[in-house]
Image: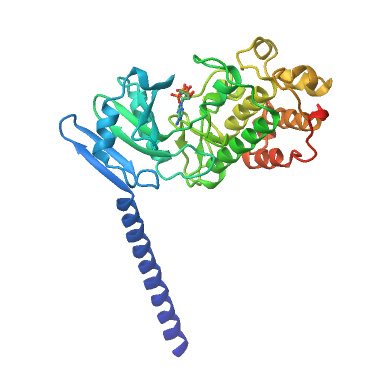
Amino acid sequence: MAESTALALYIAISCLAFVASKIIVSCLLYRRWTRKRSIIQDTLSGGKFVLFRSASTHSLSSRLFIQKTMKLSNKDIIGSGGHGTVYKLTINDTTAFAVKRLNKGNSDANRGFERELDAMGDIKHRNIVMLHGYYASPAFNFLVYELMPNGSLDALLHGNNWGKAKPLDWPTRHRVAVGAARGLSYLHHDCIPHIIHRDIKSSNILLDHNMEARVSDFGLAALLEPNQSHVSTIVAGTFGYLAPEYFDTGRATTKGDVYSFGVVLLELLTGKRPSDESFIEEGTKLVKGIIEVNKEKHAIDRALEWYPIGEVKRVFDIAEKCLESDPSERPTMAEVHKMLEQVSTSDRHPDCS
Ligand SMILES: Nc1ncnc2c1ncn2[C@@H]1O[C@H](COP(=O)(O)OP(=O)(O)OP(=O)(O)O)[C@@H](O)[C@H]1O
């Protein structure tokens, strides 16, 4: 009798503790959520401006932000892509942001905007470009990002409207590969729900003031239910980077991101775009030929003044694994990151090329 009373008491206390902990966690989460967003409803335009509170934005007034954003013009443009135009928004001498104005007028762009916000709101990682806020109105949408002063990997490797920068040296290329792999691995494995990027390419890998890689542009990313594995059916991506199975299934998967990352590794190694003749003619079989007949020296970017051949071979080898035509044969991004980190960085000397 005493035993069953004790058991009933034990169950009752456990249930109460469980319910109380859920209530406390919900209250804390709600307080955190309200504290970290500043929202301005613009009655004139019918728009809503949301600024996420962070070290870079806490001292800024949302109204000033809106006023400056509305005054952006062509002279502030720093890039443009399939989804819109990117501007540099200068607040004062020490503070600037990148503002992406999204093309409006088709429902896909609007859905992309909402998805991007859902995915980006809480993501903070040293290899991910941070979203500071957004503006949504019936006429147009803006996303406010951290400004990456060294631009995109695409521009650094291949040049842009403003010309070609100084060629990236081997240690920088290797560090960019490791950083981008770390960022992507975080999205795939550490974010709950997990995130598939869907559009990994060199123009979506940006470089901060330390030349550290940051993965950007989640306009096409979709959230996964933690227990739903990894599939979605929204068509996305950029030709040249898309995994072959995507053309059959139309499904974005984490292994599709791994394939796209393999193409970026080839770009870093060869200095060629995926639209380059050798990519088009031989496709990614290019890499197989390079590995099998020891042709690394011929394939490596001529802009590289020196490089350690052992490291180059190992990175070609990792690219080859990422580019396996069977997705199940490809490594995960966590494995890719580990392999890239293990590529020796010791004993580097200009004479070893
Ligand atoms: N946060 C940022 N900081 C600095 N430059 C940026 C930033 N975001 C984008 N850019 C620049 O703007 C360019 C265009 O970016 P955007 O994401 O709009 O297009 P994309 O990635 O080239 O193509 P798509 O829209 O098809 O993905 C980038 O290549 C980069 O040079």
Depicted 343 relative to depicted 262: above or below? below
| Extreme residue toward the front, this view | 93
| Residue 280 lies in quadrant | top right
For the N terminus, the quadrant is bottom left
Depicted 27 relative to depicted 107: above or below? below
Q: Position of residue 19 (x, y in %)?
A: 36, 67
Q: Position of residue 158 (x, y in %)?
A: 59, 17
The colour scheme used to paint the residues is rainbow
Which of 322/64 is in front?
64
Q: Position of residue 276 (x, y in %)?
A: 63, 12
- Tell me the residue at 55%/21% (across/down): 155
- Tell me the residue at 31%/57% (across/down): 31
Left or right, residue 72 beside residue 309: left
Q: Position of residue 189 (x, y in %)?
A: 56, 45
* Residue 251 visible in the shown view: no
- Tell me the residue at 80%/39% (across/down): 347
Which of 278/175 is in front?
175
Left or right, residue 137 beside residue 142: left
Task: Report the number of discs.
Answer: 0
* Residue 335 visible in the shown view: yes
| Residue 163 lies in quadrant | top right
Left or right, residue 340 beside residue 202: right
Left or right, residue 237 beside residue 318: left
| Extreme residue toward the left, this view | 44
| Residue 328 lies in quadrant | top right
For the C terminus, the quadrant is top right
